[in-house]
C-alpha cells in the first residue's frame, strides 16, 4: 500500500504556479499639502500682479507734481522769444541782405528751444508746445531744403504765422 500512496501523490496534479493578480486602480497622485510658512512662486506672482493692478488703478487719482512757477515762467519767456524771432524772420523782405544771418539765428534759437523743451513730459500735451513745435519744424524744414535765402511760399508762411498766433494765445492762457 505504500506504493499506492506514492502513486497517488504522483498522480496528483501540481497546482499552477502562483501568479499575482494585478488590479488597476486609479487614485489621485499624492499632492503634498501646501506649506503656509513660506510663499510659493505662484502665490508670490499672484500677489505681485494684484498689487501692481491696484497701484495702476489708483495712479490716475494722484495729482501730478506741479511744475514750479520758475520753470513755467522760463518756458513762457523762451517761447515768446522764439515766436518773435520767427515772426521777425518771416516778415523780412526777401531782398534784405540780413536774411541769411536772421535765418541762421532763428535756426540756432529753434534748435536750442526744441532741445530744451522736447524732453519735458509736462509740456508735450500743451497746445502752445504743439503749435510752436509744428511751426519750427516747418520753418527749419524749408530752410534746410531750399537754403537760408529762399523765400517761404505765401501759403506755408500764412500757416506758420497762424500757428504762431494760436500758440501765443494758448501761451497766454497757460496752455
Image (cartoon, grey):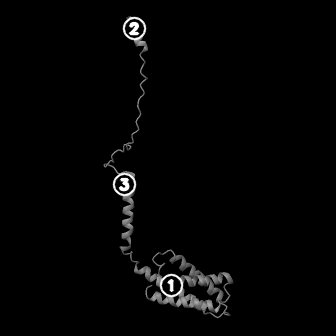
Q: From this view, report whether residue 18 is shown above or below residue 146.
A: above
62 with respect to 91 (left or right): left
- Residue 115 in the image: state x and y as whole percent: 54, 76
Question: Which residue lies under the disc numbered 1?
Answer: 79
Measured in 3D between alpha carbons, the distance from the residue under mark 1 to the one under mark 2, in whole angstroms, is 130 Å
Task: Write down the residue under mark 2.
Answer: 4
Residue 43: mark: 3
Q: Helix, strand, or loop for circle 1?
A: helix
For marks 2 and 3 on the same chain, the one whose residue lies earlier in the sequence: 2
SS category of the residue bearing label 2: helix
Residue at horizontal 52 percent and vertical 86 percent from the top: 81
Q: Quadrant of the C terminus?
A: bottom left
Q: Nearer the viewer, residue 73 or 170?
A: 170
The picture quadrant where one finds residue 155 is: bottom right
User: Which residue: 63% across, 82% down?
Assistant: 141
Pick whichever of labels 3 and 1 is earlier in the sequence.
3
Determine the image quadrant of residue 107.
bottom right
**Which label's residue is closer to the chain start, 1 or 2?**
2
- Considering depth in this image, is 21 or 96 the residue closer to the camera? 21
Horizontal and vertical percent position of residue 45: 40, 56
- Whether label 1 touches label 2, CB < 8 Å: no
- Quarter holding residue 137: bottom right
- Point out the image quarter for the N terminus: top left
Tell us which disc is closer to us: 2 or 3: 2
Could you classify mark 1 by the number of other residues whose Cα lies within 10 Å: few (under 14), some (14-19), or many (20 or more)? many
Q: Residues at badges 2 and 3 in contact (C-beta under 8 Å)? A: no
Determine the CA span between mark 2 and mark 3.
80 Å
Who's the residue at 47% across and 90% down the image? 169
Q: Nearer the viewer, mark 1 or mark 2?
A: 2
Residue 131 in view, yes or no: yes
Would you say residue 105 is visible in this rendering? Answer: no
Amino acid at each position: 500500500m505504500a506504493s499506492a500512496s506514492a502513486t497517488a501523490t504522483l498522480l496528483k496534479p501540481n497546482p499552477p504556479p502562483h501568479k499575482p493578480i494585478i488590479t488597476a486602480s486609479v487614485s489621485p497622485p499624492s499632492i503634498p499639502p501646501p506649506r503656509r510658512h513660506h510663499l510659493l512662486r505662484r502665490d508670490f506672482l499672484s500677489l505681485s500682479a494684484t498689487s501692481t493692478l491696484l497701484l495702476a488703478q489708483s495712479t490716475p487719482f494722484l495729482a501730478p507734481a506741479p511744475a514750479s512757477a520758475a520753470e513755467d515762467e522760463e518756458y513762457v519767456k523762451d517761447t515768446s522769444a522764439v515766436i518773435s524771432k520767427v515772426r521777425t524772420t518771416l516778415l523780412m523782405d526777401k531782398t534784405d541782405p540780413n536774411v541769411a544771418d536772421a535765418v541762421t539765428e532763428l535756426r540756432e534759437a529753434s534748435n536750442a528751444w526744441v532741445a530744451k523743451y522736447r524732453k519735458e513730459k509736462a509740456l508735450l500735451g500743451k497746445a502752445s508746445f504743439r503749435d510752436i513745435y509744428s511751426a519750427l519744424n516747418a520753418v527749419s524744414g524749408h530752410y534746410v531744403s531750399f537754403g537760408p535765402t529762399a523765400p517761404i511760399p505765401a501759403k506755408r508762411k500764412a500757416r506758420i504765422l497762424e500757428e504762431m498766433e494760436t500758440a501765443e494765445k494758448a501761451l497766454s492762457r497757460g496752455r
